[in-house]
Image (cartoon, helix red, strand yellow):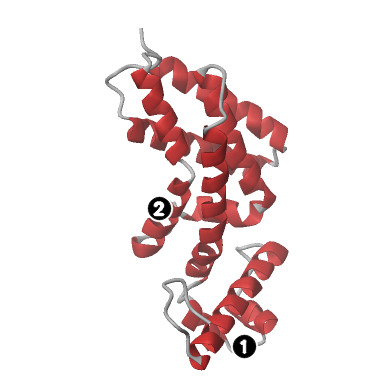
């Protein structure tokens, strides 16, 4: 057996990796079943049938466990958005809405996990915040590229920085997700609200 870099794993390495994966899956189960706020390291250890110390060897905090769980999720969202990007048609608002809709639908499939990550980026500091923010931004590369094309085609003002505009849209999106979570909005209502925000953004950024 080899790791991702191609290095041959020893039996001890393989056992360590198996324990790591087992703890991550146990944490995922507990977060989804109990909710991130109510989840505890002890509950995760009980599900994984390991000690609390073993859980903390995998990740030193509950937030770090959440970040590890979401890494693969965000990479899958990025891949889906990148594939859609090549097939987009219609006006800029339609194309942008389609990309953001894919992100929203993917996140709402595991709403508890993503809502916790979005909410807690306001509270996390240091490495936890940097890692979470970097993961969240993975899916938004296609949005940034779409905005850059809009500038090239004269659809958007040429003084716009695509990265800054994409981050602004991401912040709008995070606000909608928080509102949907707090007010119990259904997916359809959240999508309508997000499109309305995007329409305002495009109107503000449009070339005159």
* Position in image of residue 192 (x %, y %): 65, 26
Residue 130, visible in the rendered structure: yes
Residue 179, visible in the rendered structure: no
- Binning the other alpha carbons within 10 Å of mark 2 as few (below 14), some (14 to 19) or many (20 upward) gives few
Q: CA distance from mark 2 to mark 1?
A: 30 Å
Secondary structure beneath disc 1? loop
Res. 101 image quadrant? top right
Which residue is painted at 52% across and 27% down in the image? 96
Res. 26 image quadrant? bottom right
Q: Nearer the viewer, residue 188 or 125?
A: 188
- Give the total number of marks visible in the rendering: 2
Q: Nearer the viewer, residue 120 or 152?
A: 152
On-image quarter of the C terminus: top left
**Tag 1 or tag 2, which sits nearer the N-term?**
1
Name the residue carrying label 1.
50
| Tags 2 and 1 touching, CB below 8 Å | no
Q: Nearer the viewer, residue 77 or 62?
A: 77
Which residue is painted at 34% across and 62% down in the image? 126
Name the residue carrying label 2.
134
In this view, the residue farthest toward the left is 159
Vertical placement of 175 versus 96: above or below?
Answer: below
Vertical placement of 19 versus 87: above or below?
Answer: below
Res. 158 image quadrant? top left
* Position in image of residue 173 (x %, y %): 52, 37
Which residue is painted at 37% across and 60% down in the image? 125
Secondary structure beneath disc 2? helix
* Position in image of residue 52 (x %, y %): 56, 85
In this view, the residue farthest toward the top is 208
Q: Nearer the viewer, residue 68 or 41?
A: 68
Which residue is painted at 68% across and 68% down in the image? 29
**In-image side of 7 versus 175 (left or right):** left
- Binning the other alpha carbons within 10 Å of mark 1 as few (below 14), some (14 to 19) or many (20 upward) gives some
């Amino acid at each position: 057996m080899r790791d991702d870099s191609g290095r041959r794993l020893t039996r001890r390495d393989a056992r360590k990796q198996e324990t790591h994966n087992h703890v991550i899956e146990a944490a995922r189960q507990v977060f989804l079943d109990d909710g991130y706020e109510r989840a505890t390291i002890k509950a995760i250890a009980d599900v994984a049938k390991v000690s609390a110390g073993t859980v903390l060897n995998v990740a030193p905090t509950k937030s770090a466990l959440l970040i590890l769980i979401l890494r693969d999720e965000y990479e899958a969202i990025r891949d889906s958005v990148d594939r859609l990007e090549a097939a987009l048609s219609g006006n800029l608002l339609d194309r942008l809405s389609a990309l953001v809709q894919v992100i929203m639908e993917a996140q709402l499939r595991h709403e508890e996990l993503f809502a916790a990550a979005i909410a807690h980026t306001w509270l996390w500091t240091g490495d936890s915040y940097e890692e979470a923010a970097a993961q969240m931004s993975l899916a938004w590369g296609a949005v940034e590229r779409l905005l850059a094309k809009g500038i090239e085609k004269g659809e958007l003002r040429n003084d716009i920085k695509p990265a800054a505009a994409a981050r602004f849209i991401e912040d709008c999106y995070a606000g909608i997700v928080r509102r949907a979570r707090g007010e119990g909005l259904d997916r359809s209502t959240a999508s309508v609200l997000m499109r309305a925000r995007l329409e305002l953004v495009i109107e503000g950024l449009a070339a005159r």
